Every structure is written in structure tokens, then in C-alpha cells.
Image (spheres, rainbow, N blue to C red):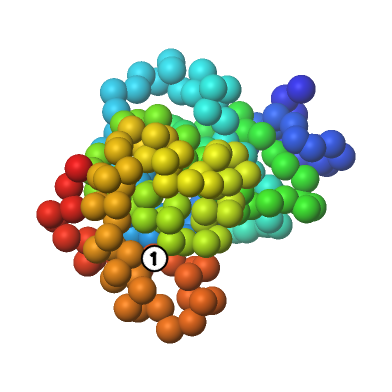
Amino acid sequence: MQSRDSGTSHNKSPQFIKLAIEQILVPHSNYEWMDEGNFYPMAVPAVKKQALDLLQLLQPILVVPSGKQITKSSKRGIPTYKLLAGRRTLQLISEQMPRQTKILVVCMEDKHIDTKSLEVMDFLCSILLRRPDDETKTLLATALLADVEFSKAASNSLDVSTTQKISSMLGISRATLHRITTNPRRIMATRTNSPADIKTTLGIIGDIDSENKI
């Protein structure tokens, strides 16, 4: 795929283009507990600047056109793009580079995009590949067992059809899986008034007991 500047029309999708960091809008997650869980901490690993170019290829940033917006550098407005995936990559780059810096991203066509599946896969790669701590495993396990919408989206990329498969993915036993998710699932059940509520958020971040440790 060829790299093109941001002014090029998007006739084919996906394609690599270059955008200024300030052109990328970061939306709230489709799943509130992801934002609450601090899965993308401000603590930045020791990534050298010369590694950032490689990161754009190995862990690419996916965006979709979202209109125009006035910025500090352009009062007339510049084309903006909504972040679909690559949140951690964008964070690492933004920590070290000015907002006017142009970076390589993958632009998706603004049609028929399964944004939730992209977000879930991006989340799973970021969390599972960075050796999650006990609290993160608890949240992820509970989500796969109790958040219907999240589990369904995750199943597009991973086999999470049984508790055994979920526990194997997390590197824990089924007994541990049951132990660490019992209390969070109970909290969730007490807060749920209708089946529709399950689809939005776990809403249990502040109530996970510290004793739910692996």
C-alpha cells in the first residue's frame, strides 16, 4: 500500500496516509469500564524516538474520516480523523512528539466499519501482550463472562466460548477464574435492572475488592 498525504481522497480502503497528530480525535471507549480501568496508563515505557517509526508499522494506528475541525495551527479548519485502533501507539508517540508531527496511519473507508470489534481487538492486544496485572485479569475475565456485547465482539477474534478457554487465555486455572470473578459478577448483577444494561458497562471498577487477587 502507498503512503499518501491527508489531502488525498480515500477511494480505496484501507490505505496508509500521513496525518498530523492533532488531526486524530480520540473518542471515549464503547465500553465505559475500559476507560475506568486505566488500561492505557500515563506511565510510558522506555521507547526511543527512533523506535516510533517502526511502531507505526508493527502496531498501526487505524482511523476513519470525521470531517473538519479548527485547531491552533489552522483557523480555517483541517480534516480530522477518529481513532479506531492503535490507541497505545498513538499515546506513546504523543508523549514524545509535537502535535503538528505527521505520522503514518491506516485510513479506513467511512462505510460499514465494525468499530466495536476493532476496538476490542486493539484492547485485547494491548492488554494481553503487556502481561496484565491481577486487577486487569479480573476485569477482563469478568467482562468475557458477563458483558454480553464485549464477549460477542471478542469472539470474532478469539475463542472465548467456555470458561476453560477463557482461563487458558489468561494463564490461570478455572478455579482461579471462578474465584476472582465471583464478587465482581455479583456486584454487576445487583446493579443490573434489565438485560439491556449488561450491554453497556460493567460499572464495577470502584467496587472490586482488593482480596480478588490471583
Q: For the view shown, which residue lies furthest in the right direction? A: 11
SS class, disc 1: loop
User: In this view of the protein, which residue sits in the foreground, 210 or 27?
Assistant: 210
Report the amino acid beneath label 1: Leu
| Residue 51 location (% of width, % of height) | 43, 18
| Residue at numbered disc 1 | 202
Asked if one can make out residue 200 in the rendered structure from this viewpoint, the answer is: yes
Q: For the view shown, which residue lies furthest in the left direction? A: 211
Q: Is residue 111 left or right of residue 106?
A: right
Please tell me which residue is depicted at 72% across the width and 25% down the height of the picture.
3
User: In this view of the protein, which residue sits in the foreground, 178 or 24?
Assistant: 178
| Residue 52 location (% of width, % of height) | 46, 23
Q: Quadrant of residue 77?
A: bottom right
In the picture, the quarter occupied by the N terminus is top right
Asked if one can make out residue 77 in the rendered structure from this viewpoint, the answer is: no
In the picture, the quarter occupied by the C terminus is top left
Please tell me which residue is depicted at 81% across the width and 41% down the height of the picture.
10
Please tell me which residue is depicted at 70% across the width and 29% down the height of the picture.
16
Please tell me which residue is depicted at 34% across the width and 70% down the height of the picture.
188
Residue 27 higher or lower than 85, as above or below: below
| Residue 145 location (% of width, % of height) | 43, 56
Residue 131 higher or lower than 78, as above or below: above
Q: In this view, does 146 lie to the left or right of 153?
A: left
Q: For the view shown, which residue lies furthest in the bottom direction? A: 193
Q: In this view, does 8 lie to the left or right of 29?
A: right
